[in-house]
Amino acid sequence: QVQLVESGGGLVQAGGSLRLSCAASGSIFSINAMGWYRQALGKQRELVTSITSDGSTNYADSVKGRFTISRENAKNTVYLQMNSLKPEDTAVYYCNADLITTWGLRDGYWGQGTQVTVSS
């Protein structure tokens, strides 16, 4: 069994910052890419940013220069530092991990989501 637990969401004023964390635990052999997605009310879930096991990153154009993803492989944890937040960043943020379990299955796993609300 694999679990992804997110933390760090909340309410912040426009221009503020938040840091999200996501820790993966359970029957994990290795983790390939980890990423953050978000889903605003009435919209489809979209990729915000991702990071590979060797540290390569990519970002959605809407967050480039404002958000930074990082990970600690030893802790199976990924972080999302969000600066200069805008009201349009308001969404539920989901962590995703592309991993291989101890029984050899490769699959994508999701966290439960954490709400980020940016007030204007």
Image: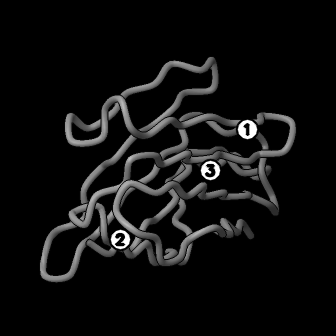
* Residue type at numbered disc 3: Leu
The answer to whether 90 is drawn above or below residue 78 in the figure is: below
- Say the numbered circle drawn on residue 110: none
| Secondary element type, mark 1 | strand
Q: Nearer the viewer, mark 1 or mark 3?
A: 1
Q: Residue furthest bottom?
A: 41
Q: Is residue 59 above or below residue 103?
A: above
Query: Mark 2, mark 1: which one is toward the viewer?
Result: 2
Residue found at x 65% / y 45%: 78
Distance between the alpha carbons at the discs numbered 1 and 3? 11 Å
Give coordinates of residue 23: x percent, y percent.
Answer: 73, 58
Identify the image quadrant of the N terminus: bottom right
Q: Secondary structure at mark 3?
A: loop
Mark 2–mark 1 Cα distance, whole angstroms, equals: 35 Å
The quadrant of the picture occupied by the C terminus is bottom left
Q: Are marks 3 and 2 in contact (CB under 8 Å)?
A: no
Which residue position holds label 2? Answer: 118
Tell which of 70 and 30 is nearer to you. Answer: 70
